[in-house]
Amino acid sequence: MTAASHDAEFPVARPRRLRRGPALRRLVAETRVLPENLILPMFVKEGLTEPVAISSMPGQVQHTRDSLRKAAREAVEAGVGGLMLFGIPEHKDSVGSQADDPDGVVQVALRDLADEVGDDIVVMADLCLCEYTDHGHCGPLEQDGHVNNDLTLERYASIAVAQAQAGAAVVAPSGMMDGQVGAIRAGLDRAGFPHVPILAYAAKYASVFYGPFREAAEGAPQFGDRSGYQQDPANVRESLREVALDVAEGADMVMVKPGLAYLDVVAKVAETSPVPVSAYQVSGEYAMIEAAAEKGWLDRERAILETLTSYRRAGAEQILTYWATEAARLLR
Ligand code: PBG
């Protein structure tokens, strides 16, 4: 023993005491990820007879109606809190007619899910047009190629009603049009769905990390990009404004997307939001970890749990993650 170690003055504090052994660490952990806070995004494609693997998202598939039901049931059994459904129609056109067709792929799948798991998990529908338009943008276009904001609002209100009629427990507009939450709220209320909550993709950035999703949902823009409606990654004040607007328009929950590269935004939104705050661990985040793990460069399960813990620590209360079912099992 050296003199220093007997010196009562130094170190003054020993934070390591509470790190000595798993039992102590568990007792003092500040953050926990719970299966019920996880939301599983799922893809269902019209006309499939077999699930189709998504090559840029190893382990994820475009579902058939049957495989969707089965995967939904597995999520329920693992204790996952919610599902977020994306549909891929066989036929696309300039206004995305299939998005609000009562027999469109997502409406059919919503009825299946409401029937199969509707009492056990929150079945949510992503509400956007990019998977349904032939040009791949999130709403009908003007002559010059910009998305026509107010025409898009009418489409979104109609889609919300179709989704609610099909059994969606929550609708989640992701198109970043101005006024979308208010237009959807009014549409739902008029159609007799005042009880259906809106989870608003409130702060959604024009991100490179959506790359693999374009293969999954087949909704890549055929020209240009989404920077005319999604946010500039450079901005954070703008996100607080978007959240405030969405809440004023009637958002019941708000989302920040992507998550990992935007945890500062999640933290700021969580500090002031009067409604629950969700965050989306997007396709590119999934792909990065899967790819590194496949090369043996990262411990996959630890990477999944560590990133989910970081989301919770930053203040996200619900986390959308493609690992939801697996993570829920690991957490139990
Ligand atoms: C559609 C939508 C996108 C994602 C969710 N909803 C793609 C986009 O905005 O370009 C991305 C999800 C992911 O990358 O996992 N508006």
Image (cartoon, helix red, strand yellow):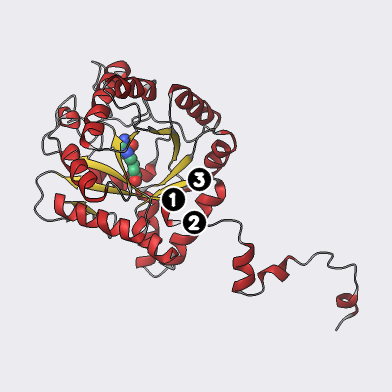
**Residue at the image point whose x is 29% and y is 45% from the top:** 213
Look at mark 2 in the image and give the residue it sits on: 33
Q: CB atoms at circles 2 and 1 under 8 Å apart?
A: yes
Indicate if the residue with disc 1 has its beta carbon within 8 Å of ligand 1: no
Q: CB atoms at circles 3 and 1 under 8 Å apart?
A: no
Q: Amino acid at mark 3?
A: Ala
**Residue at the image point whose x is 31% and y is 16% from the top:** 150
Look at mark 1 in the image and give the residue it sits on: 37
Classify mark 2: helix, strand or loop: loop
Kindly tell me whether residue 104 is visible in this rendering: yes
Say which quadrant the N terminus sits in.
bottom right
Pick the residue in front: 206 or 167.
167
Q: Amino acid at mark 1?
A: Asn
Pick the residue in front: 125 or 137.
125
Q: Is residue 90 above or below residue 231?
A: below
Q: CB atoms at circles 2 and 3 under 8 Å apart?
A: no
**Residue at the image point whose x is 51% and y is 28% from the top:** 238
Classify mark 1: helix, strand or loop: helix
Left or right, 9 with reference to 91: right
Q: Is residue 105 above or below residue 187?
A: below
What whole-number distance in Å separates the C-alpha atoms at marks 3 and 1?
9 Å
Q: Is residue 305 above or below residue 40?
A: below
Left or right, 35 with reference to 160: right
Left or right, 45 with reference to 220: left
Q: Amino acid at mark 2?
A: Val
Percent coordinates x, y for residue 32 in the rendering: 53, 57
- Estimate how packed mark 1 is, as few (under 14), some (14 to 19) or many (20 or more) residues with alpha carbons within 10 Å: some
Look at mark 3 in the image and give the residue it sits on: 316
Quadrant position of residue 288? bottom left
